[in-house]
Image: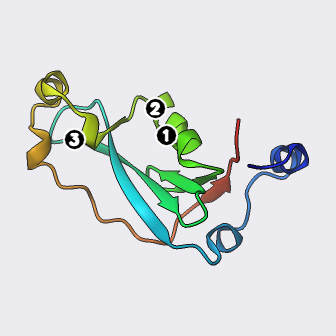
Amino acid sequence: MASLIDRIVALVKPGVDAKAFYSDKTVTKVEWWLSPHPYPELHWGRLRVFSDFTADAAFDESDGFDDANYAGYFLSEDEYNPLENLDARDEEHLGVKASELTPPTWSETPTRFHCLGIF
């Protein structure tokens, strides 16, 4: 958890160097999320959890968070839902079954990075 001072500094000086955020971490879990856009124009989101329990959430860039809960809140604010939680109603809206979907392949190097910390 970020201290109050760390959170204030993050607001005053947004963006932490991506190299510093990812330093000495390994990915322990990857979740794929979908925005409610009909197939074939799917909008993907990715949530990764690291060995120190921090996480990042990405559309086409990354945002770093203190933990996976906050990364998930970030994605859900834009109506993204975990792929593993899709039900029959979601599949009907998307026009495709979840079992037929393949998540995209993204570069491990973010094009833009901000460490948002906790809210």
Q: Against 114, is 71 above or below?
A: above
Type of the residue with mark 3: Glu
In percent of the image, x 78 and y 49: which residue is there? 2
Question: Amino acid type of disc 2?
Answer: Ser
Contact, mark 1 vs mark 2 (Cβ under 8 Å): yes
Three-letter code for the amino acid on which mark 1 is drawn? Gly
Mark nearer the N terminus (3 vs 2): 3
Question: Which residue is identified by label 3?
Answer: 41
The quarter of the image holding the C terminus is top right
Q: Residue at x 61, y 64 (%)?
A: 52
31 horizontally vs 13: left or right = left
Q: Which residue corresponds to mark 2?
A: 76
**Badge nearest the viewer, 1 or 3:** 1
Relative to 14, say whether 4 is above or below.
above
- Sooner in the amino-acid sequence: mark 1 or mark 3: 3
Label 2, secondary structure: give it: helix
Q: Helix, strand or loop at disc 3?
A: loop
How far from the left and from the top, in percent, is residue 46?
Answer: 40, 52
How packed is label 1: few (under 14 Cα within 10 Å), some, or many (20 or more)? many
The part of the image, by quadrant, that contains residue 115 is bottom right
Say left or right for 54 vs 91: right
Depth check, front residue: 48 or 41: 48
Q: Residue furthest top?
A: 89
Q: Position of residue 76 (x, y in %)?
A: 46, 32
Q: Residues within 10 Å of mark 3 (few under 14, many from 20)?
A: few
Q: Nearer the viewer, mark 3 or mark 2?
A: 2
In the drawing, what numbered circle is on residue 72? 1
**From the viewer's perspective, is 81 left or right of 76?**
left
Residue at 70%, 47% (x, y): give it: 117
Looking at the image, is 101 positioned above or below residue 72?
below
